[in-house]
Amino acid sequence: MHLDVLDLRNFYYRTQLGRAAQKAVRDRVLGLWPAGQAEMTGLTVVGFGFAVPLLRPYLEHARRVIGLMPAAQGVMPWPAGLPNVSVLCDETRWPLETGMVDRLVVIHGLETSNNAGALMAEAWRVLGPGGRALLIVPNRAGLWAPRENTPFGFGRPYTLGQLDAQARAAGFVPERHAAALYIPPSHRRFWLRSAPMWERMGQRVSGLLAAGVVMLEVSKQVQAPRRGLGEVVRRPLRVLEGQARPSAEPV
């Protein structure tokens, strides 16, 4: 069950808790994938689900940025004040060429999908060899998953082990994991003002235990075709063809 795009927009852009959550997750993503010119020049960056709040830092230096939004969720124009790069699509049929994506961010997409396996297969298809995806899902053991007053309380929350297994089943190679969103899911000013402190403390002390989301970075590795002497000979040469076969009878 996908959330409505208006509910997602209102949470992330019109509530203090949503803005705090956006900053906490985006800062962690930027720690894994810096948005500088040296790192992003020439790369195509794509987000699926409702990833656009995390993609804005990449607009300046990436070659192309695209926000894919599933049809069951709905779409909104993004980014504000700039040419639109958001696209409505079927969650298992993305309007992208095979192998064209260098970096892919999935958030509010995997846990709400009706066919997570097919979604992961589509992510595999669009990534180029050596491309990387960052899967961000609600943490089953965290404080946010049981709370339905935020987008992280919908769909199927994951443990890191479950997310790792699903990525491997789709053919991805897990590279590293991270976590974010340690602030309690409360609209009270005290918690909102102390959000940066909670994120710093969470990264140092609690690891995945109390995090609202878990993140898994995966890569697409494609083996080179076997050539030359390594190929299997399908029809070995018969150098003795035409020769008389040895007889077992005594001469």
Image (cartoon, helix red, strand yellow):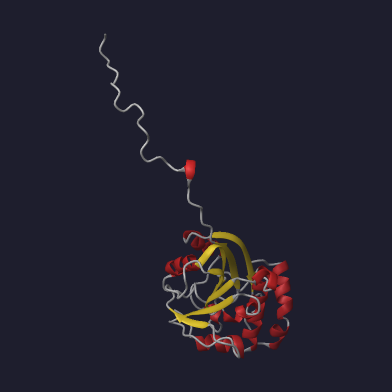
Judged from this view, the residue extending furthest toward the left is 249
Q: Is residue 152 left or right of residue 191?
A: left
**From the image, which quarter does the N terminus lie in?**
bottom left
Whether residue 209 is visible: no
Judged from this view, the residue extending furthest toward the top is 251
Towards the viewer: 56 or 41: 41
The residue located at (57%, 81%) in the rendering is 52
Instruction: Give coordinates of residue 60: x percent, y percent.
Output: 65, 79
Q: Is residue 235 left or right of residue 86?
A: left
Please tell me whether residue 247 is drawn above or below residue 181 in the rendered image: above
The residue located at (56%, 64%) in the rendering is 131
The residue located at (45%, 66%) in the rendering is 121
Judged from this view, the residue extending furthest toward the front is 242
> Residue 132 lies in what quarter of the image?
bottom right
**From the image, which quarter does the C terminus lie in?**
top left
> Residue 8 lies in what quarter of the image?
bottom right
Q: Is residue 196 left or right of residue 130?
A: right
Please tell me whether residue 83 is drawn above or below residue 226 in the rendered image: below
Whether residue 29 is visible: yes
Towards the viewer: 134 or 103: 103
Please tell me whether residue 84 is drawn above or below residue 106 in the rendered image: below
> Residue 119 lies in what quarter of the image?
bottom left
Instruction: Give coordinates of residue 35: x percent, y percent.
Output: 67, 74
Instruction: Give coordinates of residue 12: x percent, y percent.
Output: 59, 85
Instruction: Give coordinates of residue 188: x percent, y percent.
Output: 67, 87
Q: How many marks?
A: 0
Towards the viewer: 105 or 246: 246
